[in-house]
Each structure stands twice: as C-alpha cells, then as structure tokens.
Amino acid sequence: MTEPSQDDPKSTVPETDATEADATEADATEADATEAEDSKPAPAQAKAAGAEGEDVEGPRRRARREREQRRAAQARAISIEDSRREAKRRALGKPVQEAKTLGRGAVRGLKLLMWTAVVAVLVVGLGLLLYFTPVMSTRNVVVTGLGEVTQEEVIAAAGVAPGTPLLQVNTDAVAERVAEIRRIASVRVQRQYPSTLRVTVVERTPVVVRDYPDGVHLFDRDGVDYATALPPPGVPYLDTENPGPTDPATKAALQVMTSLRPDIAGLVGRVSAPSVAAITLTLIDGRVVVWGTTDRTEEKALKLAALLTQPGQTYDVSSPDLPTVK
C-alpha cells in the first residue's frame, strides 16, 4: 500500500479536524466541571447559610429543639438500659418485668396528695403563728349574765392575763375557776376573735331559805347553800333535818316547790319535809297543804291550783285522784 505523502493536502485535512474536535470536547468537559463546581456551595457559604437559618430559627425554637433532642436522647438511654437489663434477666433465667407506667389517675392522685400536704403545712404554720404570737391575744374580757356577782369577781376568778394568745386560753379551765364562785350556777367561756374572751354566767336563784345562827342561808333548786343574805320576798323557809344537795328530804321538798306555778309558789311561806313521804306546805295566810310523797307531783300541782280557789283550811292532794278540802 502506498502511504500518502506529507505534502498531500488531502492527508493533512482530517488531522486538523480531529485536533479541533478534541479541543472542543475538552472545552465542553471543562465547562461542565466548572458548572458543577459553581453549583456546589462553598464551605464558607454553607456555614453562612447555616448561621442565617439559625438566626431565622430564633432562640425559643432553638431551645425547644434542644430540649426535644435531650429528651429523645434520655429516652433512648433509658430504653437501652431497660433492654440491657431485660437481656440480663433472660440470660439468668429470671422472669422479665413489665414496664410500669403511671396512669392518669395515679398522676392526679399524686397532685392531690401534694396539694393536701401544702395546705396542711399552711394550716399548721398559721396555727403556730396564732398560738405563739400576740397577733390574736386577749385584750378584752366581756362578762354577761351578772346579777349579784360583780364583773371584777369574775375576771379575777378567770385568771387570764392580758395579752395571752386566745388559742392558749383553756376555756374549760377558765369556766371551772369561775364556777368556784358559789353564787354562780353555770359558766360558758368563748373565744371571740380577734381579741375578746366572752364569759357567760348563770347565777343561782333562791328557792328556799333556812335560818342559821350566822343568818339566813339561801338554797337553790339543787339544794346548794350558796349565800348568806336577807331572805328575798316570796321565798319560803325550809324545815328539814340536814338540808343539802345530797339530803333526800331536801331534794323532795325542792322538787315540790319547783313543780308549782310561780303564782302558787309565791303563796307558800314554809315547806316542811321531815321525810320524803310527809311533805307539807304552809301558806302565808296560814292554810295548810298536805302533799305526801313526790309521786305524781305534776298532777298534784294542777289539783292544788284548782283547790285553792275553794274556801278551806286544809287542802289534801296526797291522793291526786281524790283531793279534799277541809
């Protein structure tokens, strides 16, 4: 075969075309590489974009995201630890414990318990404050129901020092001290916040009187000899062997007197009770009432009120079914 001559123009033309084609292809490849490189963000640009995204995210969202990430990490750690323990139990042949979760009711119960404890602490604290400090102390003592007894006597017997916290005042002990005054039958002591102690007394009233060498003694409805004084008008004298709250004859005579209507009781001048079965009333005008025992006392009192409207000297109601007038 005959090789073409280097001077032949036909043999040089294809070489030039190939060279130009290779150059064109290389330029295209370089352009694609440049475009690809341009399309990829530079590291500095990526960091700037990330910083710009963080600025757009804001501190609250960032904090929330970080909390969620921490919770997720904690949950994963707990799950891994539980899985490890479960695998260890299975390897040792022990029963696998099921995970215990608190229900909504348990959480509600814990909240209720917590609030109950808080309220209890507050109440105890308030109680201690009122008990040990003069915030609510005794500044006034009010006494009601007085008659013969003076307010000074009651306050002195109560023995409550001014400025004593009201919660430290033992009302029962105060009532017992005031009740030692013989003229007083009953006592009630109350705290009235913020600073008042109220003492309500009921004085004894005479039902009968009796002569003694030192004077006339007053007896109340319970047979208590509580005072020596002038006999009040309308109060009869008592004739018994041993007058007192434990004497049966005295209690029988007082039972008869307290069963009479006030207008009838005011007519009695003397009640005699040598025994519980021989009670006699002597009226101011000298008429006599034979009462007998304390049986059916209420019926006898009604019969006597009707009999006294009739003339007579002796009125016998010892048998209420057959009362007589003589």
Image (tube, rainbow, N blue to C red):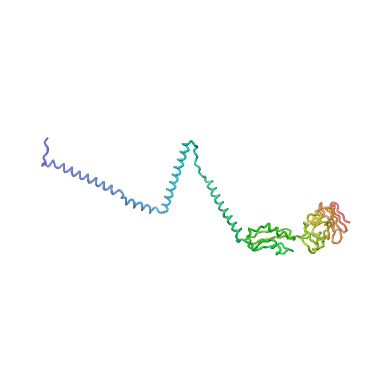
Q: Give the percent coordinates (x, y) of residue 121.
A: 57, 54
Residue 291 in sight from this viewpoint:
no
Quadrant of residue 284 within the rendered picture: bottom right
11 relative to 148 in the view: left or right: left
Residue 233 is situated, as x and y percent measured from the top left of the image, at 80, 63
Q: Residue at x 86, y 58 (%)?
A: 288
The foreground one among 311 and 80 is 80
Residue 28 location (% of width, % of height): 23, 46
Q: Quadrant of the N terminus?
A: top left
Which quarter of the image is occupied by the C terminus?
Answer: bottom right
Q: Residue furthest top?
A: 1
- At which x and y percent is residue 185? 74, 58
Q: How many marks?
A: 0
Q: Is residue 150 above or below residue 95?
A: below
Side of 98 where 25 appears, left or right: left
On the question of residue 288 being in view, the answer is: yes
In the image, what residue occupies the spot 68% across and 57% down?
Answer: 173
Residue located 34% across and 51% down the image: 47
Name, please, the residue furthest toward the right.
Answer: 326
Q: Locate residue 163 relative to residue 274 in the image: left or right.
A: left
